[in-house]
Image (tube, grey):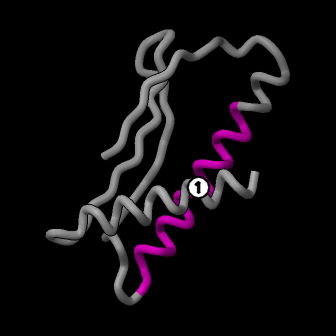
Amino acid sequence: MISCKMAVEELRTVKDYRDLLAESMFFHALNQRFFKLSRKKDPPYFSCSAAADVLVHPCKAYIMTSSCKEKGTIEALKSMLTEVCLFCDLI
């Protein structure tokens, strides 16, 4: 599991709402990609997901988790971070 906490602002403007929707779409697309990779013949992990959620105001957590085969932690981690980098390059 990889997690990161950041400050979160309240939704006040249309731009704030648009940014929230874009973030939600990003996580949805990323999770679909994680699922697709987990169904390959020799997957780097059995399952993987990414999410963002408000813990307590004003703290938001970004979390990525995966379950991998024994001694496959590094391979799973590389795959997870590679996919995030690829998705960020597309934006």
Up/down of 83 relative to 12, above or below: below
Magenta region, residue range? 20-40
The residue at which mark 1 appears reads as 85
Left/right placement of residue 19 relative to residue 57 reads right
**Residue 75 place in picture, x, y as percent:** 32, 68
Say few, some or many: other residues with alpha carbon within 10 Å of mark 1 (under 14 / 14 to 19 / 20 or more).
few
Quarter of the figure with residue 23: top right
**Residue 7 place in picture, x, y as percent:** 53, 16
Any magenta on residue 72?
A: no
Any magenta on residue 31?
A: yes
Count the labels in the image.
1
- Extreme residue in the bottom direction: 41
Q: Residue at x 57, y 57 (%)?
A: 30
Left/right placement of residue 25 relative to residue 74 reads right
Q: Nearer the viewer, residue 33 or 70?
A: 70
Q: Residue at x 32, y 57 (%)?
A: 66
Q: Amino acid at mark 1?
A: Cys
Up/down of 67 relative to 40, above or below: above
Q: Residue at x 69, y 31 (%)?
A: 20
Quarter of the figure with residue 33: bottom right
**Residue 25 place in picture, x, y as percent:** 68, 48
Q: Residue at x 44, y 28 (%)?
A: 61
Up/down of 41 relative to 5, above or below: below
- Extreme residue in the right direction: 14
Left/right placement of residue 34 relative to residue 73 reads right
- Extreme residue in the left direction: 70
Left/right placement of residue 62 relative to residue 85 reads left
**Residue 14 place in picture, x, y as percent:** 84, 22
Please, what secondary structure does the residue beneath circle 1 have? helix
Up/down of 9 relative to 48, above or below: above
What secondary structure characterizes most of the magenta part? helix
